[in-house]
Image (cartoon, grey):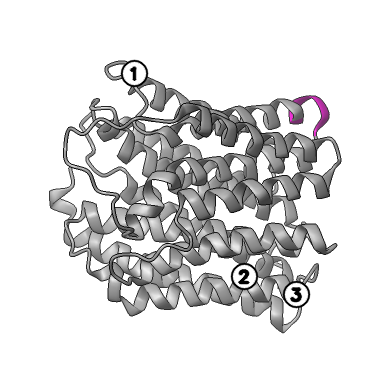
């Protein structure tokens, strides 16, 4: 075994590939390459393979640096990659129940990885880190509920959306303002930060309370509560209406991801199109924000010029494609056929290919510096 300096590289690649397959599975169904209706497989590939790959890649790269602990080892990278690959294969062949079991293993693996890095330094790296325990709690609750009741809706609510949203809010509270280049955020090395744990704990509590309210069947009330909390976090913590010290396409992409997350939740409240409104959250919100953060991770760890994120037409195009794809998917409502739906699939796929092309260029151009 040897230390891996940048474990995000293979996991980000896998994430994009799984994201592509997660949407193309509808095409495979449409042309008859698969016989089963792939709704569950699609959802689980996107949550448990696509998003999870980026989450694991980021955490396995960042946590050792946040905690001044040992770097990720090659065995851990191999295990993470193997687990998520099995997750994808099981769903692609419609073994969705068994895939849920594997997702539990993925979560335990990731949780063990994080806890093992806190043996040396047990202080929280930043206040938003409190959202991470909440994320794992929701996911495990959803999995336990599934074991007893085989309730896929609750599984996706807690282990899918709840897990990812907590991570986005928690990690985003640190990353989004910095990546948006908002003023007065950079402090000299050694500066001691004073965390307002009461305020952050209230945000964690009310955000996650909304998922349990939805679990009780109070869908509108849950989304109203979540919208209020997310609006506050978006404006106050993420600096939605604050202007950065310099304009950048990546910063704009992050702000648009916040807007679409709020928009999707708002439409859940005022319309009956829950599924289509959720895709505004998942594509225009979660996916766009994930890709923007992954762009910075790739640039920073490949020692590339960060000015790329300010003036890159590639980033601008990716943002446009994902946002337009989200709008088209919302407009297609419950239909998985027709020009509008397939246009959203194509736009999502093209955006992933464009991003992957740049990631591979940076990865292979710097591969000898990474291990």
Secondary structure beneath dot 3 equals loop
User: Which residue is label 1 attached to?
Assistant: 122
In the image, which disc is placed on residue 332? 3
Which residue does the image show at 82% across and 50% down from the upper left? 220
| Residue 33 place in picture, x, y as percent | 68, 66
Q: Position of residue 38 (x, y in %)?
A: 73, 57
Query: Mark 3 to mark 2: distance in Å?
Result: 10 Å
Look at mark 2 in the image and give the residue it sits on: 326
Q: Give the spatial CA distance, label 1 vs label 2.
A: 40 Å
**Residue 191 placement (x, y as % from top left):** 21, 34
Please provide the residue range marked out in magenta: 146-150
Placement of the C terminus among the 4 image quadrants? top left
Dominant secondary structure, magenta: helix
Q: Earlier in the sequence, mark 3 or mark 2?
A: 2
| Residue 26 numbered tag | none
Task: Please identify the quadrant where the N terminus is shown.
Answer: top left
Foreground: disc 1 or disc 2: 1
Disc 1: CA contacts within 10 A as few (<14), some (14-19) or many (>=20): few
Is 121 situated left or right of 41 in this image?
A: left
Mark 1 or 3 closer to N-term?
A: 1
Q: Nearer the viewer, residue 158 or 246?
A: 246
Mark 2 residue crowding within 10 angstroms, few (<14) / some (14–19) / many (20+): many
Q: Are marks 1 and 2 in contact (CB under 8 Å)?
A: no
- Determine the residue located farthest toward the top in the rendered image: 119
Secondary structure at badge 2 equals: helix
SS at circle 1: loop
Sequence-first disc among 1 and 2: 1
Q: Position of residue 195 (x, y in %)?
A: 39, 30
Q: Is residue 147 left or right of residue 304?
A: right
Q: Is residue 350 magenta?
A: no
Residue 287 seen in this snapshot:
yes
Compared across the picture, whether 323 is left or right of 73 comes to right
């Amino acid at each position: 075994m040897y230390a891996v300096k940048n474990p995000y590289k293979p996991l980000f690649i896998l994430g994009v590939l799984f994201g592509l397959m997660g949407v193309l599975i509808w095409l495979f169904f449409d042309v008859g390459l698969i016989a089963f209706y792939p709704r569950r497989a699609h959802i689980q590939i996107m949550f448990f393979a696509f998003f999870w790959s980026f989450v694991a890649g980021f955490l396995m790269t960042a946590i050792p640096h946040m905690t001044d602990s040992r770097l990720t080892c090659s065995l851990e990278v191999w295990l993470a990659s193997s687990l998520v690959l099995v997750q994808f294969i099981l769903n692609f062949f419609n073994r969705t129940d068994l895939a849920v079991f594997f997702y539990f293993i993925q979560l335990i693996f990731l949780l063990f990885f994080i806890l093992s890095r806190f043996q040396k330094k047990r202080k929280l790296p930043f206040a938003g880190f409190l959202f991470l325990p909440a994320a794992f709690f929701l996911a495990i609750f959803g999995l336990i509920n599934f074991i007893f009741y085989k309730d896929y809706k609750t599984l996706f609510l807690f282990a899918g959306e709840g897990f990812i949203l907590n991570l986005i809010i928690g990690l985003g509270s640190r990353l989004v303002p910095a990546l948006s280049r908002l003023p007065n955020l950079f402090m000299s090395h050694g500066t001691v930060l004073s965390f307002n744990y009461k305020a952050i704990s209230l945000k964690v509590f009310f955000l996650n309370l909304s998922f349990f309210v939805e679990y009780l069947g109070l869908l509108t009330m849950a989304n109203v509560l979540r919208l209020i909390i997310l609006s506050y976090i978006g404006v106050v913590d993420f600096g939605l209406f604050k202007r950065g010290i310099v304009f950048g396409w990546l910063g704009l992409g992050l702000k648009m991801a916040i807007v679409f997350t709020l928009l999707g939740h708002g439409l859940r409240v005022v319309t009956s199109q829950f599924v289509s409104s959720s895709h505004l959250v998942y594509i225009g919100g979660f996916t766009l924000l994930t890709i923007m953060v992954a762009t910075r991770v790739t640039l920073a760890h490949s020692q590339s010029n960060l000015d790329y994120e300010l003036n890159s037409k590639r980033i601008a195009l990716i943002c446009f494609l994902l946002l337009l794809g989200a709008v088209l998917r919302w407009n297609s409502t419950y239909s998985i056929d027709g020009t509008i739906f397939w246009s959203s699939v194509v736009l999502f796929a093209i955006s992933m290919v464009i991003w992957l092309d740049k990631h591979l260029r940076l990865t292979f151009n710097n591969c000898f510096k990474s291990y």
